[in-house]
Amino acid sequence: MIEGRVALSRDVFYAAIAMKTEQALEHVTAVVRESGTSFYWAMRLLPRYKRDAMYAVYAFCRVVDDIADDPGEEAEKLRRLADWRVEIERLYAGRPQMPVSFALIEPIDQFDLRKETFLAVIEGMEIDSSASVRMPSVSALEDYCDRVACAVGRLSNSIFGVDETLGDPVAKSLGQALQLTNILRDLHEDAEIDRLYVPNDMLSAYDIPPADVKLVIRHPRFPEICEELAAVARRRYADAELALAQCDRRTMKPAIMMMQNYRRILNKLVARGWERLDSPVSLSKQQKLWLLLRYALI
């Protein structure tokens, strides 16, 4: 009788886990769909089991990014991110509590997603949680890009099924290119909340005092820095294209689509110029649809 009850309790336990996982998948899909980004459509190109895994990874990135971006005290943001550090430990111990974590259970097991990569993303969000964000050097900016973008690329490549020797160069170059594009696109918006990702050593090279961000981005020599960073981003896109050429293009369709999407945004930023940073740049729905149709046929 006791053994029967134990067996029954295990069945109930696993049924409860399955139900929570299914609800979690619905949750992360809604998070991605409602984000309004091109990520949702790029990931629609994947088989269902890989798409669900990518949605779970994106939802994790979205929730920790929202913590860093939400209004509030730095200490409170860091506390909430520390809670996520604990949650990642619980997740890898088989005891998750949050909906996004339940959605990550199967991907972690199926695609061997590494705990330290999730923690790296949290480290990047801890930087963004500071009341005033500055990058002291180019190497600090590269480290930041690795945490918030390249790490996501490494998780994605594991899900896509790309060997590390081929995937890591893509994650590194494309992650830097995408993040530099984001930084250049958001200069005005970030300045409003005292964030500046342009490294201090670059500012010094152009004799720009780093203290007041709003003055920095209006400095007459600041467009020269933007051009230099845009040139770096273009080189990283070129590096990513070479690295992607070593991979199976069908496997990497979402990465290729993301690259082409953001590359076009960078081109539009350059065409707009760097004197009107408050003039937003994005792709139209028609451009996004054209990219989706083009790369769906690879």
Image (spheres, grey):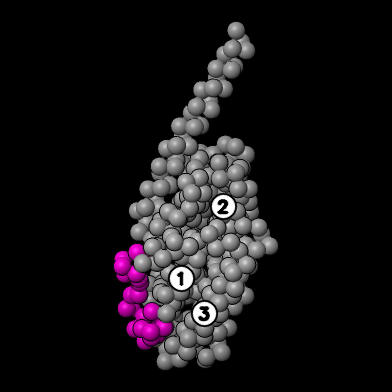
Question: Are the residues tagged 1 and 3 within 8 Å (C-beta)?
Answer: no
Q: Amino acid at mark 3?
A: Arg
Q: Is residue 87 visible?
A: no
* Dot in front, 1 or 3: 1
Query: What is the CA distance from the residue labelled 1 to the residue labelled 3?
Result: 12 Å
Q: Which type of secondary structure does the marked residue at label 3 adopt?
A: helix
Asked which secondary structure carries label 2, the reply is helix
Q: Which residue is mark 2?
A: 159
Residue 276 pos. (x, y %): 34, 83
Identify which residue is drawn at 55% across, 63% down: 249
- The residue under the point 45% across, 91% down is 221
Instruction: Say whether disc 1 or disc 3 marks the residue closer to the N-terminus.
Output: 3
First in residue order: circle 3 vs circle 2: 2
Check residue 260 in the rendering and tell me which mark sits there, or answer none.
Answer: 1
What range is drawn magenta here? 268-289
Instruction: Answer whether residue 227 is magenta in the image.
Output: no
Q: Nearer the viewer, residue 48 or 294?
A: 294
284 part of magenta stretch: yes
Residue 236 falls in image quadrant: bottom right
Q: Give residue 297's position: percent from left, percent from top.
A: 44, 61
Confirm or deny contact between disc 1 and disc 2 (CB under 8 A): no
Label 2: how many residues lie within 10 Å, few (<14), some (14-19) or many (20+)?
A: many
Residue with the mark numbered 3? 234
Q: Residue at x 50, y 61 (%)?
A: 253
Give the residue type that dot 1 points to.
Gln
